[in-house]
Amino acid sequence: MNKIPVAILGSTGVVGQKMIAMLSDHPHFYVAEIVASDKNLNKSYGEVSTWFERTKIPSSVFQMRFKSTSEITSPYALSALPSEVAAEIEPNLASKGIHVISNASTFRMNKYVPLLIPEINPSHLEIVAQQKTTGKMVTNPNCSTVFLAMAIFPLYATYKIKHITAVTLQAISGAGYPGLPSLDILGDCIPNILGEEEKIQNEVKKILGSTSLPATFTTTVNVNRIPVKHGHTVIANVHFTENISKQEIEKLFITYAEKFPQAYQLHFDNFSPRPTRDLTDFDNRTHIGRIRVSEDPRQISLVAMGHNLVRGAAGAAILNLELFHKYLGK
């Protein structure tokens, strides 16, 4: 079967590199074009890129020359662009008939652009019909939102949730490269990431809601940057309107892990999940552990953790690419 060509925007950053690595042996898509700013046009990828992946740069990409956005001919573009750059480039590509699957936050809350997690809200793809361009735009969530949403999804589908309190412990690779100065993060915890709390609060409600209305529970979110290389951890306290038991919640997550084995990994010991022990380089799973009922039997707490560059970014975009391509084939 002939593979489908894909262009990568922002290919030299840590998310763009992860996209390239994950597409290197994909059964249906391949990296056909890499896009750069004017200063790198016509240079080769191997000449420009500082490669961070543990696997080598795919030989097909190493000698590939950078193109401008006006030269893209692939039907799909995976975007790892910064938000301020994506604001201009992504709609321009869509106007030319190119379908854009974006990791940027720019259009996530646009009412005509679906914010997708394939296991949760594939039906939200229906709203692309309201986009006026021939090419369509699809987004994936913030790198912490995705793990919170995956953890809440089985609970929200089964019980009535009143409030969610979430505390994130976010890895330094989430800040991109060069990211944070070492003296700002080594041995420290930074108790804020500007704009991050608002993104999580708004995005999780859009994902779990309908195409026209967000979810109605309230949220409190606190974010932190910690000196871990990869892996975002979310500690969630979920307040229900009814009493709940640990056994019910564990049974529910076991059911969802059986239904979505590539999406959930459950942990039952008291010291999991942990980024350095439990994550693999291309890990698309949300790891769930430490499920407990609080003193109030209407409240539970749990820990959700996942690879911020994979399910939190590049892997999420590729899963949405697969979903969108199937949707267009209807």
Image: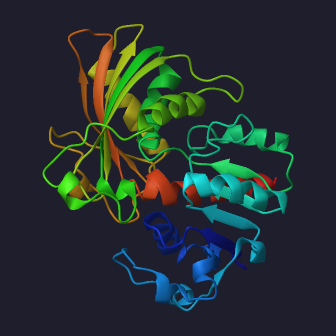
Q: Is residue 306 left or right of residue 293?
A: right
Of the pair 85 and 14, the residue shown nearer to us: 85
In this orientation, does residue 2 appear?
yes
| Picture mark count | 0
Q: Is residue 57 above or below residue 201?
A: below
**Residue 143 picture location, percent across and down:** 44, 47
Q: Is residue 155 above or below residue 91?
A: above
The residue at 61%/70% (across/down) is 8
**Residue 45 picture location, percent across and down:** 53, 85
**Residue 305 picture location, percent across and down:** 32, 45
Q: Is residue 94 above or below residue 65?
A: above
**Residue 62 picture location, percent across and down:** 51, 88
The residue at 56%/46% (across/down) is 105
The residue at 49%/24% (across/down) is 156
Q: Is residue 130 left or right of residue 78?
A: right
**Quadrant containing the N terminus in the rendered view:** bottom right
In this orientation, does residue 319 appear?
no
